[in-house]
Image: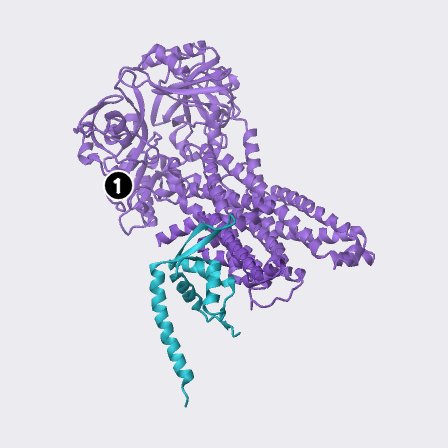
Amino acid sequence: MNKTQLLQGTLDLLILRILELGPNHGWGIANRMRQMSNDGLTTSHGSLYPALHRLEMRGEVKSEMTASENNRRARVYTITRTGRKRLNTETETWEAFALSMRRILRERP
Amino acid sequence: MIGRLFASLRGMLRRRQIDREIEEELHDHLEREIEAHRSRGASPEEARRLALSDLGGLTQTIEATRDVRATWLDTVWRDVRYGVRIMRRSPQFTVTALTLLVLAIGSTTAIYSIAYAVLVRPLPYPDAERLVFLAEKDGAGIIWPNFDDWRRRATSFEGGPASSLADAVIVRSGPIPRRFESRSVTSNFFRVLGVSAVQGRLFDEADARPDAAATAVISHTFWMREFGGSPAAVGQTISLTRTSFTVIGVLPPGFRYMTPADVYLLLEPQVAANYRGMQSRNTRTTLFGVARLKPGVTVTEARAEMQTIAAALAVEQSNNSKNIGVQLVPLTDRVVGDFAPTLTVLAGAVTLLLLIACVNLAVLLLNRSTARAHEFRIRAAIGGSRWSLIRQLLTEQALLIVTGGVLGALAGAAILTGLVSMAPREIPRLDEIRLDVGVLSWATLFSCACALVFGIVPALKASGISGSGQQLVVRSGRGSTRSASSLRRTLTIAEIAVATVLLSGSGLMVQTMVRLARIDPGFDPRNLQMASFSLTGPQWPDPRKQVFYDAVVERLRAVPGVENAAVAYSLPILGSYWWNVFSIPGKTAEHWISVGEFPNAGMLPVTAGYFETLRIPLVKGRYFNRSDTSDSMPVAILTSSLARKYWPGEDPIGKQLRQGFPSEPYGPWRTIVGVVGDIKQEGVDRETSPQIYMPIVQQPRTTVFAIARTRGPLPGSWLEAAVHDLDRTVPVFNDRTLDQVMREASSRRRIAMVVLSVFGGVAVLLAAVGLYGVIAQGVADRRQEIGVRMALGATRDQVLSLFLRHGLIVAVVGIGCGIVAAMLTARSLASLVFGITSRDPATLAAVAALLTVVTLLACYVPARSATRIDPSEALRSE
């Protein structure tokens, strides 16, 4: 299995993408990330939570404490309009970047 | 920006909730992850381990998440909480540091506030630096004819010199006439000062013409109180002592010249009427001049011009040339007057105290940062950044300073109230004194700077992160304190020196007060109650006054609690109100000119019973009695030194004298019937002044004092009741005890003594503590060395003397510097000390001895602990 370390700055983008699909809590986001990349991307869960809170401080996601099973409470995150806007622009940037990278790497002299 | 601040504040308040939610969120994550791992077949332990490692540690993640949430305000708040915790964990340090700060900030602020209000703040007149004060030679009141001459000849002044004298008027409106302070001024007075009216107008030359209507100017407070601030006051008449005056104008609020006054009258008409014999050259007056220097004219130039004028006058008036001369000083000097040296001393004392408190604070912080060096090194080693350490230290110091500053301001206000209540009423501009914010912030800043320099720099040095920041080699704790301990020693020497200066000042003042208390004032000042009444106006011809005095005395003697009573023109300590030259039969003016001085003395009309009431001892002859009446032979009683001076070796009883110059006599020849003890008429600390007493029935006066010897406190209306029983229109005022008068007279000295003694005591204490610290630190630093010495056979006495010698050197150097400083600053006390020189060697020696004993004691305690060191233990300890 080929696990790739996350590139700097891509974590925010991944979180926003997952939340675009629907509100989710931290573990759910981490799990979704694993599934969607077929276990191809790993991130330390330790950096996930600071990133989530940073996004909330910047107003790109909002959160709410909701009751979950077993008497616990979980924080559920929802993407905001600002978050969507950022996701769109950064997705474009990222695709353009990825395309350029591929072109350069596939180019045979 | 504001929005963010609010968000930060809200965040801070919700801090706990957010923290709890973060924990909950991560615990929830952990549980889910563990379940996920278990569902894939991991054992519970394995699942937990995997989940935790994926999270990178639960606590760390919680911290990291919190940090995202934290704002700068949270950081400050955390530092503050940590600071408070540190302060609470070392209460001894905190209390000591706060006490020092409160002491320094509080006393500095209070005393500098007074000094600023009285000394520095300019007079409330425009271009006040051009105003000068004029008096006769030696500061005596100006004789009107002289003033008239100055006015005609002087060219240095803008609008000529003005003059004024403080007086009192009786306002005859309402059922009982009331007495108000007044001031009689020349018509140019207000223009010279540069004030203008808020209503109507002030005096001009036309008002001073002989045919002009009688006019008055009133103060703002009088206007508000008597006329309700109505503009219609201008043009109304007020009925005063003798005549009615038309109010022409109101002065601005707060206007004041020397003493406050409510009514201002013109001086020129009073001179024209020869009121108080002002046209004569022989009467002493309380008239003083004020003038505005023309732009560009200096005080020295004006003084030179006035001296020339005075010299010319002296030639013309060959009569009393000895007394001619002019005193010309800046008005500020005069207003600040006698109080300046006291304030200089207080300001000096408080500066020294501030210095000593800051030195102690410095030593304290220095000790603390050396003690905490270990903590800082560890924090630096585990990755605490230099900035976060500095921030933490800054927060700690700020916490200390802010608390100290607030408490200091409160203490300052309390000290200020205390000092103002102790201060004499005549101290200028007392009512204008407020706690000065500028001074307060200055003192706080000073302590701040001190805390920064001594608290943070050594701490950073000691933590080893100030330089390259990477020298984490653990250095020996002792090596790094070497420079700190030499600094501490220097600071202690400075403390001892300052303590020496303060203590010698306090010693001088205590001796001064003791000497003053030992002086025999010539009468018994205890249980004497006094008040004034005034018999003014045409309805009081002399015969009516003569009867009235005795009637008042009669009634007072009947008051329960009154042992004896009398009426007099003036009282001891208050001064001689009437000073005059006198003549002796057979001695010509030429004789006295050859002697160099005409005989002169205070003239003091009194009722029979005055000497008995005051308990002034009879030396020879008799006291006045009821047989001395307006029709009987004019008599006089002299003080004994006066009798000895002019009738040496003779019996003065039966001899004669007369007031005035031989060429210009005043009143009848009087026969001397008695000699009484000398008396401190001008004040306990003054030269004994000669007095000539005469029966008041033979020399009636308008405003007089009633004085009663009491068995206890009298009701407030004691004199009013007696006087108004006889005549309801006589104003009574100025009720005091002679004790109060005497206390007020010595209040400058008492303040200086109290402040110097309290500060001196504190300084000695601080110096002793400082020295104790130095020696104790020395003992701690040299434990091993002592161990070696003792192992090699040094006796306990040798060890003891090693440290005592060290302490003694510090003490002797400190005391030596202090004595030199005390000698250099002695001049500032010169005008306050009494009966002793301000460089009194005995006092300095006593202070040196006392400080030596105190410092030796301070050394002995820690030095003795050195002798208890067990050599084997000390050698093993490192």
Q: Is residue B346 above or below residue B460?
A: above
Residue furthest out toward the right: B793
Badge 1: how crowded within 10 Å, few (<14), some, or many (20+)?
Answer: many
Q: Measured from the top left, where is residue B781 in percent x and y?
A: 69, 56
Looking at the picture, tell me which residue is in the foreground, B809 or A26.
A26
Q: Measured from the top left, where is residue B629 in percent x and y?
A: 39, 11
* Quadrant where the image shows the N terminus of chain B: bottom left
* Render colour scheme: by chain
Name the side, left or right, on which B791 lies relative to B413: right
Q: Disc 1 residue type?
A: Val
Looking at the picture, tell me which residue is in the foreground, B553 or B319.
B553
Name the side, left or right, on which A20 lies relative to B869: left
The hue of chain A in the figure is cyan
The reply to whether residue B453 is visible in this rendering is no
Name the side, left or right, on which B290 lies relative to B575: left
Looking at the picture, tell me which residue is in the foreground, B598 or B463.
B463
Looking at the picture, tell me which residue is in the foreground, B6 or B838.
B6
Q: Chain of mark 1?
A: B
Q: Measured from the top left, where is residue B551 in percent x and y?
A: 38, 10
Quadrant position of residue B46: bottom right
Q: Which residue is mark 1?
A: B192
Q: Measured from the top left, where is residue B742 in percent x and y?
A: 48, 28
Quadrant position of residue B478: bottom right
Q: Is residue B27 above or below residue B324?
A: below
* Quadrant where the image shows the C terminus of chain B: bottom right
The reply to whether residue B691 is visible in this rendering is yes
Q: Which chain is purple?
A: B
